[in-house]
Image (cartoon, grey):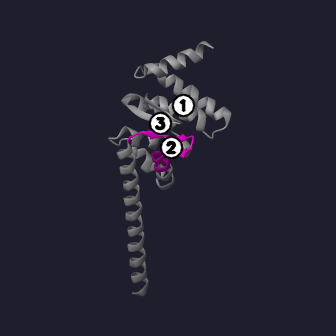
Amino acid sequence: MKKIKHSFILLLVLISINKLRSQNLNLIVKKIATINELQFEGQSGKYPNFENFELLKNKANTGELINLLDNKNAVVAGYASLGLIDKNHNELEKVFTKLLLKNETVTTLGGCLIDEEELPAVFYNYFIFESKLSEVEKNKTISKLDSIVIYNGNSNYLLHKVLEEKKK
């Protein structure tokens, strides 16, 4: 009887921890959506939404980030995709394809520049500059991303960029 009681208490504790974790994650997602800009680091430090992004990628597991790709807020989906890059997710081509099919535009803030950018382009550029993969693996992935861009006509910006690189 004592063993059952301890098991039951442990189960309740685990359920409570999971619920708190989920609430924390939802709070971070709401903060990101409220600011509604893909922000990066500025000259005077990190912008608030970049700090939210860092919290998101540290608190969310890969499955949660994949689920957030379908969030109705494009900035939340964008940060989830960047988190998957930082976590070296092994199916980045699928993530990129999903972003490319939607091809949503988001407001970005980096340094002191505010811009409107296609989310797949943000993902592509972030991968190039931030991926921690070896150069060989990184180049293989870039080749796959380039092929996806060429055979999917949803991003004129990326198509132009990839074709220009192929000319060089």
Between 17 and 63, the one nearer to me in the picture: 17
Decide if residue 98 is in sight here. Answer: no
The kind of secondary structure element at disc 2 is helix
Q: Amino acid at mark 1?
A: Asn
Between 122 and 109, the one nearer to me in the picture: 109
Between 21 and 48, the one nearer to me in the picture: 48
Of the numbered discs 2 and 1, the one sitting upstream in the chain is 2
Was residue 4 drawn as part of the magenta stretch in this picture?
no
Determine the CA span between mark 2 and mark 1.
14 Å
> What residue is at 57 percent from the left and 31 percent from the top?
141
> What residue is at 38 percent from the left and 77 percent from the top?
8
Report the residue marked by disc 3: 109
> What residue is at 54 percent from the left and 36 percent from the top?
111
Report the residue marked by disc 2: 84
Report the residue marked by disc 1: 125
Of the numbered discs 3 and 1, the one sitting upstream in the chain is 3
Q: How many marks?
A: 3
The kind of secondary structure element at disc 1 is helix
Image position, residue 101 (x, y; %):
38, 28
The kind of secondary structure element at disc 3 is strand
Q: Quadrant location of the C terminus? A: top right
Image position, residue 16 (x, y; %):
38, 69
Image position, residue 146 (x, y; %):
53, 24
Determine whether 128 is above or below 28 in the image.
above
Q: Quadrant location of the N terminus? A: bottom left
Q: Which residues are magenta?
A: 36-53
Q: Amino acid at mark 2?
A: Leu
Q: Amino acid at mark 3?
A: Leu
Image position, residue 73 (x, y; %):
34, 41
Between 128 and 66, the one nearer to me in the picture: 128
